[in-house]
Image (spheres, grey):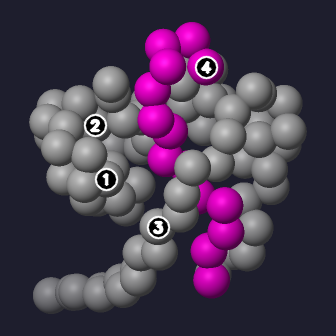
Amino acid sequence: MKIFYQGEPGAYSHQVGLEIAKFFNFSEKDVIGLFSFKDVFETIVNEDGIGIIPIENSYAGSVHENFFHLSKYPVKIIGEYYLSINHCLCSV
């Protein structure tokens, strides 16, 4: 089984995907980034995978697009993962 997230390798969702892969004893190569949240939902419905999506964050609040997708697609929430986000800005 594969784990799908929206974004590029190194993104916060990718980091969560790697942690979930460890938990389920999946390979890191089974954690796959997709272009959009909609792509994540369509892929997990069609390919029977696990999707990682943000529901809310402390900066922007709820991710309304994903609430819409949760109501539109036949998926179930099986867990949650809290990831502390710390940004560091560097300049020279």
Question: What residue does disc 1 label?
Answer: 20
Question: Which mark, residue 81?
Answer: 3
- Tag 3 or tag 1, which sits nearer the N-term? 1
Question: What residue does disc 2 label?
Answer: 31
Q: At 67% across and 69% down in the image, what residue appears?
A: 56
Rendering quarter of residue 87:
bottom left
* Disc 1 + disc 3, Cβ < 8 Å: yes
Circle 4 Cα neighbour tier, 10 Å, few/some/many (<14 / 14–19 / ≥20): some
Identify the magenta region.
Answer: 45-58
Gap between marks 1 and 3 measured at Cα:
9 Å
User: Considering depth in this image, is 76 or 6 the residue closer to the camera?
Assistant: 76
Q: Is residue 92 left or right of residue 38?
A: left
Quadrant for the C terminus in the image: bottom left
Question: What residue does disc 4 label?
Answer: 45
* Disc 1 + disc 4, Cβ < 8 Å: no
- Tag 3 or tag 4, which sits nearer the N-term? 4
User: Considering depth in this image, is 62 or 23 the residue closer to the camera?
Assistant: 23
- Tag 2 or tag 1, which sits nearer the N-term? 1
User: Considering depth in this image, is 67 or 45 the residue closer to the camera?
Assistant: 45
- Tag 2 or tag 4, which sits nearer the N-term? 2
- Tag 4 or tag 1, which sits nearer the N-term? 1
* Disc 4 + disc 2, Cβ < 8 Å: no
State yes or no: residue 56 in magenta.
yes
Gap between marks 3 and 2 measured at Cα:
16 Å
